[in-house]
Structures are given as C-alpha cells and as structure tokens.
Amino acid sequence: MKDLTQGSVVKTILAMAIPVAASMLFQTLYLLIDLYFVAALGEDSVAGVGTASSLMFMIMALTQVLGVSAVAMISQAVGRKEQDTAILIFNQSLVLSLICAAITLIFGFALGGSFLRGISADQGAYNEGLIFLRWFLPAMAVQFPIIVMASSLRATGIVKPAMLVQVTTVILNIILAPILIAGWGPGPALGVMGAALATTISSVIGLLMLVFYFIKLEKYVAFRPDQWRPRLDMWWKMFDIGLPAGGEMLLLFVYFSAVYFLIQDFGATAQAGFSIGGRVMQSIFMPTMAIAFAIGPIVGQSFGANNPERVKETFFKGVMLSAVVMLTVTVIMQWNPGIVVGIFTNEVEVQLVASVFLQIVSWNFVTQGIVFSASGVFQGLGNTRPALVSSLLRISLFIPMALYVSSREDYRIEHIWYVSVASVVVQAFFSIWLVNREFRIRFSPDPDAVVPNQQTAPTEP
C-alpha cells in the first residue's frame, strides 16, 4: 500500500500515471498493429470489426460499475486506515465480477447478432463483424475480474503489477495478431476471427497472471473465500457509486452506435474510415486517461483522510497536465493526420474519411481531457452522478443536432464531426461547474450541510 495523501501532487500524479500510460502505450501499439492487419483484409473487415468492437463500450460501461466503486470505496478505506474494510470490499467486488462475466457471455451470444444487424452498412460488414464478435466475447467477459483486481491495486496506490501484466499480454497479443490474422509463420490465416482469438488468448493469460500475483505477492488486499458470501448492503453501495459511472461509459457506446447508424448511408467506406479514426482517437486519449486514473485514488485517499485542499489541488493540476498532453497531440492532428492514417490503409477514400475526422475532432482533445479529469475527481469522491449528468448533456445535444444535420439536403459526413466537437466543448464547461459545485457541497463549512453519497465504512458480517 502507498500513502497518496502526502508529497507533491504533480509528482504523485506522474508517479501513478506514467506506469499506467506505459501500459496504455503498449495497448496502443497493439491496437495499431491489430488495425494494420485487419485493414489489409478490406473495408468490410474493418467496418465489421469496428461495429462489433463498439460493443466493447457497453462492456467497459459495466466494468466501470465495479472498477470505479472499488477505487472509490477501497481508496477511502485506505485513507481511513481500515485495511479489513478494504479487503472485504475487494472480495465482494470479485464475486460481482464473476457474475457479470457469465451474464456477458450469455447475452452476448444471444443478442449480439441482432445488434450488428441494425448498424452494419452491408451484408459483408455484418458477416465479418459477427465472426469477430463470437470469438471476442470471452475476452470481454474476463475484463470484469481483471478490472476489479487492477482497480483494487490502484486504490491502494499500487500500479506497477497491473502495468506489467498489461504489457505482457499486449506483447503476446502483438505476437499472435499477425500469426492468426495473416497466417505468418505456422499460424493459419483466420482473418477477423484471428484478431478476436488473439485478444481472447492474451486476456485469459492476463487474468491468470493477476490471480497468481494476488495469491503469491499481494499483501494489503487478498482473496478471502470466507468473504465471498453475497453482502447485499455492500453491493448496493457499489452500484450506487458505480452505476452512474457505468452509465457514463454506456453513453459512449450510444454515441459510437449513433455515429455508425448516421453514416451507414455513406457505405462501408465511411464506416471503415470512422473505425480507423476512432481507433486512433482512442489511442490518443490514453495518456490523459492515465492522468484521470491517477486522480481517482489520490482524491479518494485524500478525501478519506479529510484533506480537502489536496483534493482541489489534485483536480487543478491534473487538468493542467492533461491540457499540456492533449494540446501537443492537437497540433499534430491539425498539421497532418494522414501520417497516422496512411499506415493502416491504402484506400484513398477511407484515408480521407479518417483524416478529416481526426482533424476536426482534435479541436476537442483538450476539452475531452477536462472531462476525463473531472470524472476522476467524482470517482475518488464516491459520487459519480455528476459525471453521468455531464455525459447525458453531451448526448442530449449531439443526437438531436446530428439527426437534424443528417436530414438536410446538403448533409455531409463532416457535419457529424462538427456536432460532436460542439457537444464535447459544452460538456467540458459543464463538468468544471459540476466539480466546483461538488467541492462547495463536500467541503462546506456548515456542519449541518448534507453531503451526497458520503460512504460509511461497511462492517464485517
């Protein structure tokens, strides 16, 4: 366990964010290599994998429910010096993660095809997406216990073990991708099935590595089978914190699904271009997401230790660090996004869609960093409802405006990207207001002031 309530805030953020960013860098490398080989299969494959992968946002939304609640509740318990409480929370989160993994497999195989049918540009893209999804579902299922274990470590200030596991699995994925997708070496050329299978194999190995770490090396939180009996009171607290955060991520799934739907009349070329641009954008967001991941446990421990000034300082300096990173990337995307896009496809029309997308949406990279940082603060405070409200505002602006521009006779695909930028800018300013409002409520000098979602320490059964 590492005490995050002491020392320089900037150094503490960087000390946690850099290992997370390093693991994300490897993840980015995998995404780009995977995209490179899938793109070589043709635009139907790219569009199919892109539409199927959008389901990952739904899974991420559900994993957020457990991961965010684990970070908030465990970090606050650490700040209060209550190790037994932290261990109990971890084990209850683990039980929930296994239940969610089973539900993912059941509903994914049952309903995934119907979802793809509704957003695929044509039959070819649908067929490729369905093949990918069937072999990708196990990888999505194991994300639940992986996220719980990694989040629990992060709540205690420990990030390197999860980073090493992430790096190892990504390296394995990078090795398997060309073997299984393109048939390099002894491997069969399985196409999109190989892309999914490489991710599934790597994810399962990552899960086993984390289990080994907790059994052999972890000292602060640990597996306790005697604490696996469901504690509904604690599950309620987890859902109270995590569901709004999951809803926030679920709205990203709604956003990407809406975009695929709105641009399907432009054909598989447009969906392939958006898929490539979206993958690159996800990779670009990883450094600022790493900063947000660091903000959460620092805020949580500081809040648990009753140190409001450190909580406020963490948000301000987190936003500053995020802005520096995202401004640098914005300049690059404004200069020449084609440098990155051209790596993945030789099809000029697909390149054009992806490049224009990145050039336009890069105007909201800095504001998106603000949104991520605010979300990290809300997670640490254990009240994620404001982040959900912020995301709801964005979607409530984006979808009506996008539907309006898509109904015009002069409708072009670029109009969707401009609407997206406008909605994120509004969301960022609203997020800043919500954070300041939360600070006023949480740290009010009035002793009778009501603090929403204040967590109490759960007790042993």
Image (tube, rainbow, N blue to C red):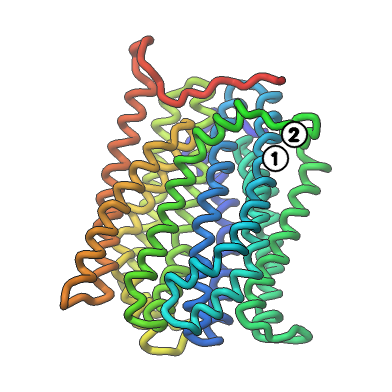
Count of marks placed on residues: 2
Which quarter of the picture shows residue 107?
A: bottom right
Q: Position of residue 334 (x, y in %)?
A: 31, 70
Identity of the amino acid at label 2?
A: Trp
Q: Which mark is residue 207?
A: none
Residue 6: quarter of image: top right
Task: Tell me residue 164's x, y (percent).
Answer: 69, 55
Q: Quadrant of the N terminus?
A: top right
Q: Residue furthest bottom?
A: 347
In the rendered structure, the answer to whether residue 311 lies left or right of residue 64 reads left
In the rendered image, which residue does mark 2 sit on? 228
| 1 and 2 marks in contact (CB < 8 Å) | yes
On the image, the x and y values in percent for residue 99 come to 67, 45
Eyeballing the image, is 362 above or below 157?
Answer: below
Work out whether residue 310 can be spotted: yes
Q: Residues within 10 Å of mark 1 (few under 14, many from 20)?
A: some
Q: Is residue 81 above or below residue 415?
A: above
- SS at mark 2 in the image: loop
- Given the image, on which type of amino acid does mark 1 rest? Val
Q: Please tell me which residue is depicted at 40% across the width and 73% down the height of the picture.
A: 274
Along the line of sight, which residue is nearer the eye, 48 or 455?
A: 48
With 27 as the anchor, is 215 left or right in this view?
right
Q: Earlier in the sequence, mark 1 or mark 2?
A: 1
Classify the position of the C terminus by image quarter: top right
User: What's the mark number on residue 95?
Assistant: 1
Give neighbour class at mark 2: few <14, some 14-19, many 20+ (Cα, 10 Å).
some
The extreme top residue here reads 447
